[in-house]
Every structure is written in structure tokens, then in C-alpha cells.
Image (cartoon, rainbow, N blue to C red):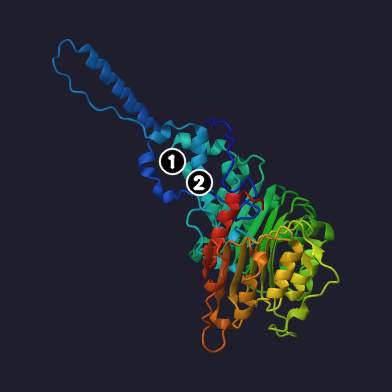
Amino acid sequence: MAQGPAIAVAPPWAGNTSGKDLGSARCPSTVPLDIVNFDDLAIDTLLRARRLSASQGHAEKSTSDIGRTTTTTRKPQRTDCFIYRLPNELLCAIFMMCGEVDDAFLYPRHDVHDALPPPMHLYSRATVLLGHVCLRWFAVTRGSRQLWTMVDVPFPQPCDVAALELSLRYSKGLPLTLRINGHYQLPKHLHTPETYQKFMCLVAAASHRWEEISFVVTQGPFRPFDGLHHLTSLPPQSFPSIKRAMLYFFGDDHRPTLPLWENFFRSTALRSLHWYGVGFRASSSSLERLTHVAVDHIDPMDVMECLRSCGQLRFLRAKVKSLESQLMGEDDGALIAKLPSPVDLPHLQVLMLAGMFDWTNLFDGITTPRLHRLDLINAGVQARAIEAMLQRSKSRLFMLGFGCVYCGQTQETEKILRSPTLRHLRIFLYETHPRYTVGEPETFDPRPFLPTYLSLYTREFAQADEAYWNGVATRDTPM
């Protein structure tokens, strides 16, 4: 069968880089497959043609007999479903919404999203399924290259290998996105080492086409790094198109991923990444190009070096790892190097810090004129240092978040809320955590100290996060 014409419609997972995903556009509205009645839509084309022919013959016979018959009984004519009258371009746009964006890949972000269940409707599987509805939908799906650029799968199964082969064929040279989420609870007999090896072999063979590779492999019937050698054994500069990357495998030892990271860093297109379990390392030229960075388990002494090396940084999420030789607590501030003069970060807009109590040396060591969101998670509150940074930078902070803060931060919180440097503040998050509370739970209520112009005060991170990104979208602020 001849394929339909190529249709140029932008997919919901590609396009501008504004919004919550920070490097891959969010799907503005998703249409789950279960709201589409495929039984009504899957009308056999040949059967429809026969019925139409019979209907026309009946109409001709009725016309010839009209002179002999005084009364003619008219049967209601069958009308096609409205979706069959849509042009191919609009039909293709609808197909691109038959899936759900997986929050696990909206990095960089906080770990709070890791607990969310994975989506039930995957783009790659939906595209294959839609092509089996009828002949026209088959032609439309095969003729739209953009529909095949998203490869989102659980731990690979035989059907995912087939979907990957179709994506490589019908995307016809367009850049591809690969997302593997191992959080899906699937029967073990559905995935085998042979299937995984075949899937990864196909990925490696098309290494030059991937613009995103994101793995979240938390469990499986065999070792998590099985199959990765297909990628780590590739020669240098095998990923020239890679823009976003995340490699998370179950366990603390991520050293097998280092050769792959080194290959990623050779790409001049790399802009957004999430490091897991590997030390902070890369050439200075590679770091200079990065705009969105999330790094887990970074050594405290490497935090300032990361900021100093990433001159184009817009978004940083840094989670400090506990050192065996140092006790992380109220006196841990000296673990971060104190700089003789502040580092200028002219592009930094979002700063998320976690894992240390005292961030004074960091706040004293940076100038952030465009900063409009600051989050401190599992940390204390250093009002003087925060106020001095905002005043020195002339920042217009839009959101301030204190999540899972240590107990005893009442006075510091009051001080920063009274600061005139927060006159542009619209969203405030204050959340304590029982693990960081000694004795009776803290009952501090910051509402009496909140600025009158504040739009939202909440103790729920998800609510504050959603309000922030909605505000960014309203202001059309580039991220």
C-alpha cells in the first residue's frame, strides 16, 4: 500500500524549551487512549465500500419505481464518524496527544516527583496501535515522521523492540528521544535478557540520531547494567546530536556509566543533564555549554567549582552527599569553599539546593541578577546570606521554597520574610519534616510575616511547583 504524504506537525514532546521540563517541551494537553472508542472508529474500509454501493443501488431502484409506487419507505443513510472528515494534518495532531508525559523525565527537578506513578499510555505504543485502526490511519501514521520520534518504553519487551524498529524506519532521519522507565510493575516473563540486548543493539546502531537518552532502571530480572556495553563500547563522538541525558540505575555504583558520559560530553549539542552516582567531572568546554544541570551526591567542595565552570547555567539542582569523614549538620558550612570574590552567574534563574544545613558560603560566593526561584530542601535557613545575595545581585525573586527544613528556623524565616529584597515574591513554600524535628513537632506559622502582595503560601511542594511553572508560562519567561 502506498504511504500517505509526509505531514509536518510539531510533536508535543519537542519544540520550545520553556516550561516545566526545562529542555523538552511539555505536552499541553494529553488525551488518554481509553477515551477513544476504537470499536466505533475501526470500520473496515472494504465493508464500508460495499454498503455504500448497496445504498446507491437501492436509491436508483427507488427512483425507477417512484411512478408505480405511491409510498416509498426511505432507510436512514449511514453517516461517517466526524473524525473521518478531518484533514490529515489535524488527525496527526490528535494522534500526537494520545500519550502521557512521564514526570520522571522532566529533569532537572526535585526527588518529590520520583514517587509519582508512571503514565499508563506511552507515545510509542499508541502510535503503533493507532496504525491498526483502519487503512487511512495506517497511512497517516506511516506518513508522519514526527509521530515516530518518541520512543518511551518500560523495561523493553518484544513489542517495544518492534516499536523501536518502526520508529527508526518511519521517522526517516529525524532526531529521536529515548526514555526507559523501569518503575513499571510488569510480569517478569515479559522481559528477557535477549530482548533487552536486542533493544540496546538497535539503540547503539542509531547512536547518531538520539537527541535525548534517559534511563530510569530501578529493577529487573537481571543485572541493571546488562546491555549497556552496546553503548559504552561505541567510538568517541558517536552521539553528535545528544542534547539531554540522564542515566539512573539501581544501586550506588554507577561507574559503568562513566564511558557513556564521556561520550555524551563530546557532543557540542549537550545542554541538559542529570548526573546520578558519578563524581562531578567533565572538560571545561563541555561544562561551559550546559544550561540545565541536576547532580546527585555531589561533594560539597565541588559545588562552587560546578557553578564557576557552567557559565551558561540557567537551572541548577544540587544535592550534596554525606561524607563519612564529616558530620552533616549545623556546622557543615565550611565544607563549601569560600571564594575571594563572587562568581557571576548572569543566566541562572532557578537554584535548588539540598542535603546541607548551612549554605552561607555558596550564597556569599555568587551573583545572580536573573534569579527568580530559590529552593532549600533538607536544609537550614540563612537569612543574612540570602538577603545579601539578593541585594548584591538585584534579583527579583518570584518564588522562595523551604522544604523539609530543620527545626529551629523560626527566627531566620521571620527575618527573610521581612526583608525588602522579597518585594517581588509571589509564591512561598514552608514545609517541615518530622525527621528533622527534635521533641515536639514545630508549630511555627509564617502567615503573620508574609508580604501582603503574596499570591500563594503553601506547605505542599507540588502545589508551589505547579503554581511557579504556570506563572513562568504566563510571563513567557525563557527557561
**Badge 1 is on which residue?**
133
The residue drawn where x is 74% and y is 75% is 360
Farthest residue, direction right: 340
**Left or right of 343, for residue 63:** left
In front here: 435 or 287? 435
Q: Amino acid at mark 1?
A: Val
Is 382 placed above or below 307 here? below
Check disc 2 and give the amino acid type: Met
Residue holding disc 2: 97
31 vs 396, nearest the viewer: 396
Q: Secondary structure at mark 2?
A: loop
Where residue 148 appears, as percent x and y from the top left, is: 58, 44
Estimate the spatial distance between the alpha carbons at disc 1 and disc 2, rounded to whole Å. 16 Å
Q: Is residue 233 left or right of residue 95?
A: right
Q: In which quadrant of the rendered view does residue 70 lie?
A: top left
Q: Which numbered disc flags the more N-terminal residue, 1 or 2?
A: 2
Q: Count of labels shown?
A: 2
